Image (tube, rainbow, N blue to C red):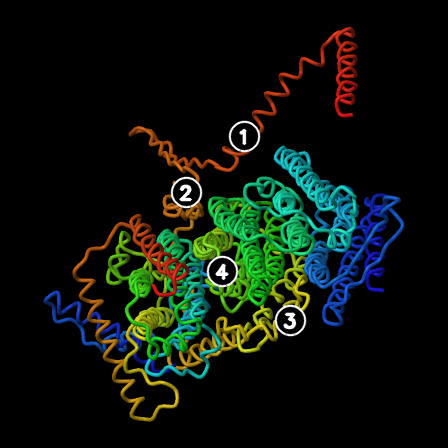
């Protein structure tokens, strides 16, 4: 029943999308579309929670649509239910935000029909149980998000972003198609049940993993396939950016987990190492890129890349532990990854929605032109601050808990016998610690330059829009109570208090490690309780405030502060001035950052100019050669457009002769 | 909790007095920071026009985070009642919370000094925090847990002996402690010149009771790092759970002696070395990170190292 209900709700979303095609010019259409999306997301969320908390037996359903010999298989199991929670929580919050934000949309007919379709696509990917349905709804999800990216297509940057997104999405789907083809084997058993039962040779399994990493990883944002993310995510409207960054990347991770953990069977020892290494590199590169940005949305998009890296570190560790039959540690690593998925979707949505509010109020996305927004927009600033603190993994908020779990998983890994992993895991641990610290730096800069200080341009005097509150309030309130998820390890205690943590390891047939009896194997005896830390901090702060206000001077004297001259509206600290040391320390190695100063000759009253040049290593070494090769090849083949009719006929004749020859030789 | 709060200004005053004596000055008494704090509490707060609510709330948040972190470090006894609440990783991250809000407060008013201080502080932190986490990894791999009381008990009781990875961890911890507490050679806590400011630049705008809270928080941080070094690398004299009154007394005396020794060593080190350029701090802390990573790697590769 829950499965058919969810399918029905997805169809309802598509129906709303169709209705919006006809009715999008009417003023009430925005409210209708987003209201229905909100309602559907909440219902799906409740249903997924009920499935996860109740019996976790998988439910399957086969519909006679699609390919005639295959049908369409759907399945709801614990993994799908968890990801349904993630997707629909993000969807509900974005829809709530869009109830107010969508009123400011200039071209609603380009956004309204496709937003519910996008939501429906994401939900259906999580429920698909055979390769054809999976790929079909995966492409549907990509295309509907592409249309949303192209919503403001008159801006040239958006057109380029859409084009690159389309190319990368096609590449990803091609990789997944090949992966499923290899999994299905020569007999063509495309439904997942048949794939699980079939045995894949180790060579084919390795190829499938690489293809899955390429396909799902490109949609999630693994380096070096991340290049479309920072262009496409900012181009879409803000609530869609929140969904793409916070939720669609997680659907891609779901795809990878489904293939690597569920469909492939026993992993080889080096798979974990590969995923781990990729995750570590992605995490550090993502945050280094983010540090160099001054567009708020691009910064957030690069940050998503970093967090996807952290998630893949957890997944790699889980694969490595699973190879060595250390199921308790594998469950720990997988829990860390899954919890980070939930946390990241929450705080990334919060940050994108906050950026949307800033964009609505000021019309600016460039941090250099903002500043001092905490005064006209106090509530947005507070929500953004909570999001920034959560994403920097600061206790007592939720981002810290998933980092803590990942660190504990790393600390449990000296037991791994393979030497490559013994060297790789501590290096990746150092990369993870580095990326966490750099993330804090990045968000101090982002929040500080945007909201604090003094306004740097007239645009930064925007006023707050109260109707955009609700979504962000919900998101930020989700970030705080998650600190209640106390994590305990060892001695027969459950690892994390949240309900999603009791996901049973799928290949764990006889072990049934629901983490309750996992502790006997003598792992770390460590624990962390976020709620108590929050209480202690609140207690200390309040005691300090009370005592001090009793003994200290009565009143703060405002206005007698720094006598800043009123004729100096510009804030002297610009973004580029804010992290010159970071740029020198990290940028000169990774981005070949070069600074040039143009000083006018004495007597000339022009201002001096500081130019910073950064080069993107991934684009220059990876993509630019490919693009150049494609362009060169197509210029060569362009000659085929202008042949005479005799030449064309001889070409057709030559091709026919070759094919007949081939057929003869093959027989 | 109260013990750390009361001892922190005394430790700072002690270090200042020793430094003065080494420089052939008489210097203030070790009790001077208490008088400074009381004086600051009684002064009016002067706020800039562009300061926001974050500026006023931040000192309390910073103080609360550092106080909680300092209370979680065992001082004279290893069985703290709430030690299972937060472990070493959480202590490091709580210090990160305090630093996050301090940097934001520095950016709040919108002057150049605050911005420069905040950017330098975050650059130092982006290398110091991973180095500290690597050190935590080394210790936890040896002790089998990240909970600090259990680590202290392990170092006290078990047959640890001399290990290369522990030596590397100690070196990394000392380097990180110097950087995090804004001591020479990374930052000069005594002057207010722009060239030498990191921590002082961020709190330049603060006055009155806010400044008192931030100064107290900085002293608490120094006490935290010294207690951490003492409890892990020199745990002798610490009372274990279930000990008698005499053992606790011995523990307190041992703790005070360790703090005094640590303060003396810090003062000696600070007077014998010059401050380095800001851009060289990256190399200094990168070395600390490499040492910590090496310690962890050695423990991954072999259990006996």
Instruction: Write down the quadrant of residue A633 in the picture.
Output: top right
Pointer 1 and pointer 3: residues touching (CB < 8 Å)? Answer: no
**Nearest to N terminus: mark 2 or mark 3:** 3
Q: Is residue B284 above or below residue A617?
A: below
Tell me the distance, in whole angstroms, between the alpha carbons under discs 2 and 1: 21 Å
Mark 1 vs mark 3: in front: 3
The circle on residue A416 is 4
Residue hosting label 2? A587
Tell me the distance, in whole angstroms, between the alpha carbons under discs 4 and 3: 22 Å
Pointer 4 and pointer 1: residues touching (CB < 8 Å)? Answer: no
Mark 2 vs mark 1: in front: 1
Residue situated furthest bottom in the rendering: B245
Please report, as a chain letter, where disc 1 is located: A
Question: Do callouts 2 and 1 point to residues on the same chain?
Answer: yes
In percent of the image, x 57 and y 77: which residue is there?
Answer: A492
The circle on residue A178 is none
Q: Secondary structure at mark 3?
A: loop
Percent across and percent down for residue A56 are 74, 68
Residue hosting label 1? A624
**Nearest to N terminus: mark 1 or mark 3:** 3
Mark 4 vs mark 2: in front: 4
Please report, as a chain letter, where disc 3 is located: A
The circle on residue A514 is 3
Question: Do callouts 4 and 3 point to residues on the same chain?
Answer: yes
Percent across and percent down for residue A613 are 43, 35
């Amino acid at each position: 029943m829950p499965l058919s209900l969810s399918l029905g709700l997805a169809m309802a979303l598509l129906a709303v999308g169709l209705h919006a095609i006809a009715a999008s010019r009417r003023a009430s259409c925005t409210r209708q579309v987003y209201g229905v999306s909100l309602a559907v997301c909440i219902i799906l969320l409740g249903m997924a929670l009920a499935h996860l908390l109740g019996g976790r037996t998988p439910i399957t359903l086969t519909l006679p649509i699609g390919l005639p010999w295959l049908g369409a298989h759907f399945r709801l199991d614990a993994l799908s239910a968890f990801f349904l929670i993630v997707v629909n929580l993000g969807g509900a919050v974005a829809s709530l935000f869009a109830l107010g934000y969508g009123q400011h949309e200039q071209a609603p007919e380009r956004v309204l029909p496709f937003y519910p379709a996008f939501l429906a696509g994401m939900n259906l990917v999580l429920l698909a149980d055979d390769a054809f349905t999976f790929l079909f709804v995966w492409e549907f999800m990509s295309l509907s998000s592409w249309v949303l990216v192209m919503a403001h297509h008159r801006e040239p940057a958006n057109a380029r972003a859409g084009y690159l997104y389309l190319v990368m999405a096609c590449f990803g789907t091609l990789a997944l198609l090949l992966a499923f083809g290899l999994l299905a084997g020569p007999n063509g058993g495309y439904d997942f049940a048949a794939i699980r039962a079939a045995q894949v040779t180790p060579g084919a399994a390795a190829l499938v993993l690489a293809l899955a990493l390429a396909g799902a990883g490109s949609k999630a944002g693994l380096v070096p396939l991340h290049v479309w993310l920072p262009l496409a995510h900012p181009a879409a409207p803000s609530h869609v950016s929140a969904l793409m960054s916070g939720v669609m990347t997680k659907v891609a991770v779901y795809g990878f987990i489904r293939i690597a953990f569920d469909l492939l069977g026993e992993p080889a020892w080096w798979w974990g190492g590969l995923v781990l290494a990729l995750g570590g590199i992605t995490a550090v590169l993502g945050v280094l890129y983010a540090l160099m940005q001054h567009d708020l949305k691009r910064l957030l998009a690069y940050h998503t890349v970093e967090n996807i890296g952290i998630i893949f570190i957890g997944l790699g560790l889980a694969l490595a532990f699973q190879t060595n039959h250390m199921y308790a540690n594998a469950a720990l690593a997988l829990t860390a990854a899954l919890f980070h998925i939930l946390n990241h979707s929450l705080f990334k949505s919060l940050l994108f929605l906050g950026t949307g509010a800033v964009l609505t109020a000021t019309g600016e996305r460039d941090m250099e032109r903002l500043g001092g927004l905490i005064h006209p927009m106090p509530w947005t600033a507070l929500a953004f601050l909570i999001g920034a603190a959560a994403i920097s993994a600061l206790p007592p908020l939720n981002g810290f808990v998933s980092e803590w779990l990942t660190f504990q998983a790393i600390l449990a890994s000296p037991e791994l016998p393979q030497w490559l992993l013994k060297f790789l895991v501590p290096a990746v641990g150092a990369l993870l610690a580095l990326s966490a610290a750099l993330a804090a730096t990045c968000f101090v800069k982002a929040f500080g330059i945007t909201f604090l200080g003094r306004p740097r341009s007239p645009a930064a005097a925007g006023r707050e829009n109260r109707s955009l509150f609700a979504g962000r309030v919900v998101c930020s309130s989700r970030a705080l109570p998650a600190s209640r998820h106390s994590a305990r390890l060892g001695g027969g205690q459950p690892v994390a208090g949240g309900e999603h943590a009791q996901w049973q390891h799928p290949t764990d047939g006889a072990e049934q490690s629901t983490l309750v009896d996992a502790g006997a194997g003598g792992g770390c005896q460590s624990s962390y309780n976020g709620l108590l830390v929050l209480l202690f901090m609140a207690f200390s702060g309040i005691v300090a405030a009370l005592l001090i206000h009793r003994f200290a001077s009565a009143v703060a004297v405002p206005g007698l502060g720094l006598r800043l001259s009123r004729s100096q509206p510009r804030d002297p600290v610009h973004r580029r001035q804010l992290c010159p040391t970071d740029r020198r320390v990290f940028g000169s190695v990774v981005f070949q950052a070069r600074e040039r100063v143009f000083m006018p000759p004495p007597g000339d009253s022009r201002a001096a100019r500081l130019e910073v040049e950064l080069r993107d290593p991934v684009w220059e070494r990876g993509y630019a050669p490919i693009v150049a090769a494609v362009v060169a090849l197509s210029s060569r083949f362009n000659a085929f457009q202008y042949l005479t009719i005799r030449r064309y006929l001889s070409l057709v004749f030559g091709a026919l002769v070759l094919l007949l020859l081939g057929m003869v030789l093959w027989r | 909790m109260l013990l750390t709060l009361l001892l922190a200004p005394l430790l700072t005053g002690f270090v200042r007095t020793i430094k003065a004596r080494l420089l052939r000055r008489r210097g203030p008494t070790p009790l001077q920071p208490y008088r400074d704090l009381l004086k600051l509490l009684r002064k009016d707060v002067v706020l800039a026009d562009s300061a926001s609510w974050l500026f006023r709330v931040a000192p309390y948040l910073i103080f609360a985070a550092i106080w909680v972190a300092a209370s979680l470090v065992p001082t004279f006894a290893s069985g703290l009642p709430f030690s299972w609440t937060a472990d070493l990783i959480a202590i490091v991250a709580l210090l990160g919370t305090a630093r996050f809000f301090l940097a934001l407060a520095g950016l709040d008013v919108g002057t150049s000094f605050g911005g420069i201080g905040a950017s330098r502080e975050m650059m130092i932190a982006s290398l110091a925090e991973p180095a500290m986490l690597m050190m935590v990894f080394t210790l936890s791999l040896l002790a089998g847990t990240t909970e600090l009381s259990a680590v202290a008990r392990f170092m006290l009781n078990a047959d640890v002996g001399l290990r290369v990875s522990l030596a590397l961890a100690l070196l990394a911890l000392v380097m990180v402690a110097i950087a995090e507490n804004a001591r020479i050679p990374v930052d000069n806590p005594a002057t207010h010149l722009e060239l030498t400011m990191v921590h002082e630049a961020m709190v330049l705008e603060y006055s009155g009771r806010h400044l008192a809270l931030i100064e107290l928080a900085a002293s608490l941080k120094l006490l935290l790092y010294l207690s951490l070094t003492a409890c892990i690398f020199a745990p002798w004299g610490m009372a274990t759970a279930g000990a008698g009154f005499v053992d606790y007394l011995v523990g307190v005396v041992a703790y005070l002696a360790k703090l005094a020794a640590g303060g003396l060593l810090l003062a000696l080190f600070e007077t014998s070395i010059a401050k380095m350029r800001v851009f060289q701090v990256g190399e200094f802390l990168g070395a600390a990170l490499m040492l910590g990573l090496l310690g962890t790697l050695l423990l991954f590769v072999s259990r006996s190292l």
